[in-house]
Image (spheres, rainbow, N blue to C red):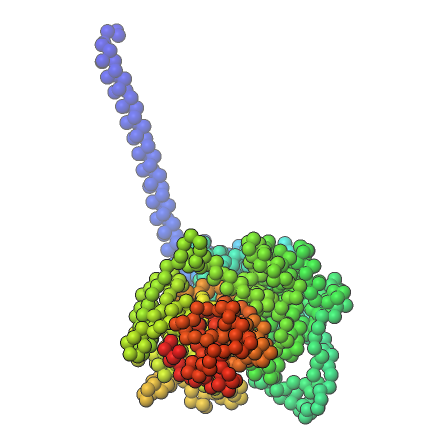
Amino acid sequence: MFSATQSSKSEFLDKARQAREERKGYKERERAATLIQALVRRFLCRCKLQKQIRKEVDDFFQDVGTTKRNALSIFKIARKLLFIFCQEDKLRFEKLCRSILGSMEVENEPKVWYVSLALSKDLTIPWIKQIKDVLWVSCNFLKKLKPDILQDNKLVTLYLTMLVTFTDTSTWKIVRGKGEALRPALTRICENIMGHLNQKGFYSILQILLTNGLARSRPSLTKGTLTAVFTLALRPVIAAHFSDNLLRSLLIHIMSVPAVVSHINTITPECMATIQTHDLLRKFTLFLSREEQCVDICVCLEGSHTLCLLGNLIHLGYLNEKVLEEEANHFVKDLTDMLSYCQRYVSQKKSNLTHWHPVLGWFSQTVDYGLNESMPLVTKQLQYLWGMPVIRTLFSDVLSKKLETQEPTPPPQPTTSQNNLPVKSLFKRAFQKSASVRNILKPVGGRRVDSAEVQKVCSICVLYQTALTTLTQIRLQILTGLTYLDDLLPKLWAFICELGPQGGLKLFMECLNNDTEESKQLLAMLMLFCDCSRHLITILDDIEVYEEQISFKTEELVTISSFLNTFVYKMVWDGILENAKGEKLDLFHSVHGWLMVLYERDCRRRFSPDDNWLRKDLKPSLLFQELEKGKRRAQLLLQYIPHVIPHKNRVLLFRNIITKEKETLGLVETSSASPHVTHITIRRSRMLEDGYDQLRRLPVNSIKGVIRVKFVNDLGVDEAGIDQDGVFKEFLEEIIKKVFNPALNLFKTTSGNERLYPSPTSYIHENHLQLFEFVGKMLGKAMYEGIVVDVPFASFFLSQVMGHHHSTFYSSIDELPSLDSEFYKNLTSIKRYDGDVGDLGLTLSYDEDVMGQLVCHELIPGGKTMQVTNENKISYIHLMAHFRMHTQIKEQTAAFIRGYRSIINPEWLHMFSTPEVQRLVSGDNAEIDLDDLKCVTFDPFHPDQPLHMSLLFCSRPPLLGFAYLKPPFSIRCVEVSDDQDTGDTLGSVLRGFFTIRKKEPGGRLPTSSTCFNLLKLPNYSKKSILRDKLRYAISMNTGFELS
């Protein structure tokens, strides 16, 4: 029976398996066909049913305008439409909504009112479900509509009307008259509907609608639409008696819409009245005062929308002054917490993880760029925080303080009538001061730092300081707002002076060593005072600081500068700065910045006593020792506050730095090596040309090294002088005198005090920029060698050479008087002009007479067509000052600085102010101290007689006095000619003392060895002969041949 082979058995099994698989596949195909047929039949049946229902709905709405439909028929047709509803039915749904709303408006026909079905025992629950579905479909349509499109705007109105109608019973006719008893039950139905919508995301829908309609430069929502949206947003909150959950939703979704409060206040004041009626600001403030709630809100919103919420809350505070005053502590805490949250994500620089925000700057959270169009309005809301009304309210404790006053002598005219005049600008208010003059504010102490008043002021200062560090792109606006009130900063300083048992400095130094919250707040107050005061002094001109004395008296500035100087010194010298991070480092930079603004202002025009900036407890010898050892505190002191060191010691340090560099470069004679010497030959008749040709190509180290000069006189003969630095010194002084001569037109003189700055028309020289670079090198060489030259620079030009114009606090207008005092007065008069500046006919351009031709320079592109107005006059003043002092001479200044800095390291000059650098260049601007010269001079002729100025080689004394001349100045008696002179001998000296002479040297003239600061005098018999010979020798200016 099983005699078949193995292969036939396998074939049999394969055929059986194939048969099974075929039967299985047939069954699956049969089942799939059945399923497909069922799906197709179902689809066709559904399509047929949908088509039938849609036809029925269309027929129903076709005659809706001619006959009144009862509520039941609307309910049934709505149920059918909702059963098959999809996007293609939006027109039918629109008609359904209009029918429902139309039924609600019919008078005295209860059966027509759609809401009447809610009273039917059998239909109450289905009706509630249906109205919920209808309203949610309406919400979904609202989410997609664009209010700026006319057709969509009409639909927005329709669906909002549906929501407004069925979330409150106030418009239902069924509750009028005898139906009043039904109101509680129907109100509960409305609350149930609102609860359902809230669960589905009702507030998110309203947020999208508001953002689409308001987050733009011009809102597209009408008064009715905005009123409806805000009404709908408030209803659930009011119904829930302002529960935390719904307040949270209101804050997150509605109050975070950009400038929504601003739009409500402008478009629909009635809603703003509702906000005040329900005391929403107080409720928001108290809700957010709980830290966990505030953090939750901020985390949900992230940066951009948190900022929008902040703006809306500030605007509400501005509009509700009473609530702001009563809840100031909570309000300030809320704003500080929200700003602190945003601050975590504010970055100092661009990176792959940051995004640009128009208010926050570089921000490490995602930025909603769709809000950028509305940011100007948000910024305007934020500005209320530093506007006068809010500042007056928050700082009421400080501003209520009365500064002690004393009557001036003689008394001025009464000014009571002026106090009521309208204030037009920050600068006009100086003329409306009270007749009394306040006493100078100094630290007195006596106020407990743990008192409620101090804590409140500290928390307010923390708020504004946090705003300054968070809202980086509008920082200047904040500072300007805080400085607008003239009396805020003086009274804040008076408040600071009263803190602690002794007042001022000791308290804040203790705070630096404490890490408590109270200490941080006190330091934040000091930091805010410094930032604001620095900003104020920076924007005020000299007239406002010194003559009008806006905000601070000059005597108070002396007190403040002394306080700041000591504070910064102790931070540096006590080692606090070395380990400072975060807030302490920010505090240091803030205090130091205010200190340096005062110091630079004092350097330009003195207001403090001579020793105000020095630290008498600092020993220069100890400082220099620590600098030698590389101690960090000594380096920091020299970096930040070198002015506490006496000027003489700083000059010695400067010379010491140069000496060390010379040693490093091998430019000093040693026992083992001699420095490389560069020899140049100079024709006296072409001194500038020869010097320029031979020195400009030299390497920097060669210029820093030894240069020997050989002069050739006008006859082409080498002069007899041997250069041991004296001849080179003469060459350097002469060449500098020539290049700085205004007749050469490389440099010009300022009007008035005739100080030098680069000529804007120097381009008449073909190689003028190379000349400027060469001049910079020569001046640098003079300073490098300690040679003083009589070159008085304009201070604005020296400031640029020192790099001060790159400082954040640099103001072109402050330096303008050093260029042209009359031009400065004319510009500042524009600032004070009370009328319309446009009447003056000025444009943003500058007309200049250039060699007989009128040239128009545009201060900004297209400036000659832009009129100067009251709004841009401050910009015009600064642009004009910047043009005159920087733009006009930009290339010349850059070339000069390039040459100068190749010799003098700019870091060496950081320890000097601008006037002090001028002293380094030109020596002391003082009369020659003959007593000083006499003390260090060997005079064999008349040891008891004073020396005369004619004995000196320059018009100014050496920078540190004659004691620092190397070699010392001396006078030598000679009896032979220079070529026979063998130096001082015992015989020549004795003959000089005892007036023993061989013969009258009548034909001999005095000579000098400038290399050795030596004056050689023949032994004349009379003083008159000596005087005549000296005058003759000086006036001839012939060089080495005169002897």
Does 519 sit left or right of 718 as displayed? right
Q: Identify which residue, 203 or 525, lies in the foreground.
A: 525
Rendering coords of residue 845 (x, y %): 39, 83
Rendering coords of residue 434 (x, y %): 68, 85
Does 671 sit left or right of 117 as displayed? left
- Number of on-image labels: 0
Instruction: Name the outermost residue toward the bottom.
Output: 413
Does 60 sit left or right of 318 as displayed? left
Rendering coords of residue 1012 (x, y %): 46, 69
Residue at x 52%, y 57% (from the top left corner): 345
Q: Where is residue 125, by image quadrant?
A: bottom right
Q: Where is residue 420, by image quadrant?
A: bottom right
Q: In this view, does 78 lie above or below 868?
A: above
Observer able to see residue 604: no
Q: Identify which residue, 1008 or 1017, lies in the foreground.
A: 1017
Quadrant into which the N terminus falls: top left
Residue at x 45%, y 66% (from the top left corner): 784
